[in-house]
Image: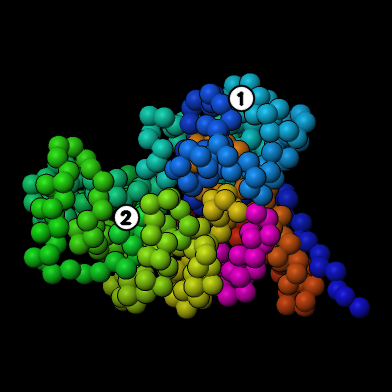
């Protein structure tokens, strides 16, 4: 006789969204394609115009959002209903409906002038909101201000010396987007040459830092500061922007960093369940005491079955005390909102399967669900 899996009810647990981005002040959009663009990582306009509407995530969003807005589950009707509402009101209503306890916000993107300030977003959502510092943005600003690599390194160390005192709960690196996760130590001559090459390419003002010896060298400055302060450092891993070389986004490239005893004080958070490298990320969380695995239910933009699959993989490899919920919501509040709905449901279903197979009892599964959705992040970030 086949065992029917149950779903652990996690619907009432407030979430700590341990990795997300700001929400645009202006929630008006000229047409459907401009709204659809928030539900694809592709930068090609034809994708938003012709293909996003056929993804399972987008179809699920339309149906779920229609229920929230009280309208027919048709794309144009939903778009008109959400666009017809005041942006502040819509943002607050969705965040409150998501039952968010805390938002940890990467302030590096979108640009701060385009989004609600972090404290204001917390007020709108009736929740706590805390900023995280994106390292590459800081590095680019310092590179524009200083004439030597040593001066940049000293300035970076000074800027990071008391990260919590400056109000940040974590640091974040997008090296995977730029030059890959195989962060190395470079001879000083090669780092200096990379600094000069960056300067020649940059011109006046901050410019995109994608020069590997230079970026790697500055990352080691940040690692030393993070380890000394025991402040979490998040890495983008796996699926992300279209300019990412996914082959270099494998978290196993970080192993030399994780092996270093002088960096063991730095809690490392691997974002986006490392998709499609979830098992590899789970392995690292299982063998290194300072590694945690983020489970993001907004971005990557996946169907429900795929989210259930990566959640099973994570729970099957990593300790549940090392897993943390996020949305990676950005720009529009729908992503922050539907991620909380989907995350609770998917995690509850995956834990219910473990109960049905006798691997957990119900009480342990409920406790694990609360850990993943809220308690683990609360402890790690000192909330």
Q: Are marks 2 and 1 in contact (CB under 8 Å)?
A: no
Question: Residue at 37% of width from left, 43% of height from top?
Answer: 108
Q: Where are the magenta residues, as a range?
A: 303-324
Residue 255 position (above or below residue 47): below
Provide the residue designation for mark 2.
178
Which residue sits at x=69%, y=38%? 62
Is residue 16 among what the camera can see? no
Is 58 on the left-hand or right-hand side of 238? Answer: right
Q: Is residue 367 left or right of residue 193?
A: right
Residue 294 forms part of the magenta stretch: no
Give the answer, above or below, for where 129 lies relative to 248: above
Please tell me which residue lies in front, 149 or 72.
72
Going from N to C along the chain, the mark reached first, 2 or 1, is: 1
Quarter of the figure that contains the N terminus: bottom right
Q: Secondary structure at mark 1?
A: helix
**Residue 161 screen position, x and y as percent:** 25, 53
Q: Main secondary structure of the magenta part?
A: helix
The numbered dot on residue 83 is: 1
Helix, strand or loop under label 2: helix
Q: Quadrant of residue 353?
A: bottom right
Residue 86 can be seen in this image: yes
The location of residue 335, given as percent across then percent down, is 58, 42
Side (left or right) of 40 relative to 70? left
Seen as rendered, the residue at the extreme right is 1
């Amino acid at each position: 006789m086949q065992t029917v899996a149950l779903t652990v009810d996690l619907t009432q647990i407030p979430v700590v969204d341990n990795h997300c981005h700001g929400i645009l002040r202006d929630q008006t959009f000229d047409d459907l394609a401009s709204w659809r663009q928030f539900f694809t990582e592709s930068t090609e306009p034809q994708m938003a115009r012709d293909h996003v509407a056929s993804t399972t995530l987008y179809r699920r969003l339309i149906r779920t959002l229609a229920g929230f807005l009280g309208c027919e589950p048709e794309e144009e009707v939903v778009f008109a209903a959400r666009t017809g509402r005041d942006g502040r009101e819509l943002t607050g209503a969705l965040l409150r409906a998501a039952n968010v306890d805390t938002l940890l916000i990467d302030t590096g993107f979108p640009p701060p002038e385009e989004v609600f300030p972090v404290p204001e977003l917390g007020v709108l959502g009736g929740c706590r909101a805390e900023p995280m510092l994106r390292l590459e943005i800081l590095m680019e600003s310092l590179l524009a201000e200083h004439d030597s690599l040593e001066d940049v390194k000293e300035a970076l160390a000074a800027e990071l010396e008391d990260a919590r005192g400056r109000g940040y709960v974590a640091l974040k690196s997008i090296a995977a987007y730029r030059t890959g996760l195989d962060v190395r130590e470079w001879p000083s001559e090669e780092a200096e040459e990379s600094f000069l090459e960056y300067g020649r390419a940059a011109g006046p003002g901050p410019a995109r830092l994608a020069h590997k010896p230079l970026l790697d060298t500055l990352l080691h400055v940040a690692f030393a500061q993070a380890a000394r302060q025991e402040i979490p450092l998040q890495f983008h891993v796996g699926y992300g922007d279209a300019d990412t070389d996914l082959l270099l986004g494998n978290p196993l490239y970080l192993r030399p960093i994780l092996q270093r005893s002088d960096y063991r004080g730095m809690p490392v958070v691997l974002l986006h369940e490392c998709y499609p490298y979830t098992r590899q990320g789970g392995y690292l969380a299982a063998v290194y005491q300072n590694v945690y695995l983020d489970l993001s239910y907004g971005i990557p933009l996946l169907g429900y079955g795929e989210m259930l699959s990566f959640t099973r993989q994570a729970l099957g490899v990593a300790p549940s005390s090392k897993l943390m919920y996020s949305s990676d919501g950005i720009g529009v509040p729908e992503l922050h909102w539907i991620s909380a709905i989907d995350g609770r449901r998917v995690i509850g279903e995956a834990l219910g399967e473990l109960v049905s197979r006798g691997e957990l009892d119900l009480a342990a599964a409920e406790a694990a669900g609360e850990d993943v959705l809220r308690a683990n992040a609360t402890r790690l970030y000192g909330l």
